[in-house]
Image (spheres, rainbow, N blue to C red):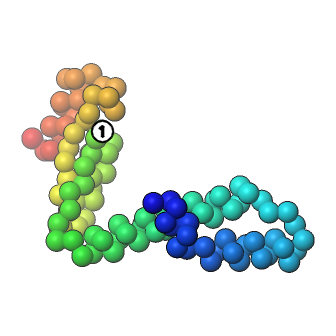
Amino acid sequence: MMRAVHLKSFDYRVLNLLLYQLRGEEVNELHMEFISMSEFLIELSDDIIYGASRAPTMLVIGGSLEESNEALAMAEIDARLFSTVDAHPTRCKVNVDTLLDAVLKLLNV
């Protein structure tokens, strides 16, 4: 996927390479990697935003208490979203009783 994004959107990289050359500077590879990663994140964001606008419903999954809170908040904002409340043992370092109380509180039970 990164390769496809890298090939698809190279405008900023090309412009920055030209600027480096015009200024007679050596190319900063860290800067170029940052641009490449930001292009990827923009593509991903576009897919999420535009994909979500066409989807009738979507499921937002929470794998920890923090993620479950975020998933629930997202679902409360957009009626097309449904959320899960979960705390996977490998991602949550909380006592089981504390975890159950927190999940029940989150679900308003």
As drawn, which residue projects farthest toward the right?
24
Residue 15 vs 2, above or below: the answer is below
x then y, percent, for residue 41: 49, 63
Amino acid type, callout 1: Ser
Residue 103 placement, left or right of 38: left
Q: Nearer the viewer, residue 82 or 25?
A: 25
Say if residue 87 shows up in the picture. yes
x then y, percent, for residue 50: 33, 74
Q: Nearer the viewer, residue 107 or 30?
A: 30
x then y, percent, for residue 32: 69, 62
In which image quadrant can residue 79 be found? bottom left
In which image quadrant can residue 29 be found? bottom right
Q: At 19% from the left edge and 37% from the top edge, which residue is drawn?
A: 103
Q: At 20% from the left edge and 44% from the top edge, which residue is drawn?
A: 85
Residue 27 vs 22, above or below: the answer is above
Residue 38 placement, left or right of 87: right
Q: At 64% from the left edge and 74% from the top edge, which residue is drawn?
A: 12
Q: Quadrant of the C terminus?
A: top left
> What SS does tag 1 mark?
loop
Say if residue 76 shows up in the picture. no
Residue 58 vs 102, above or below: the answer is below
User: Which residue position is annotated with label 1?
Assistant: 64
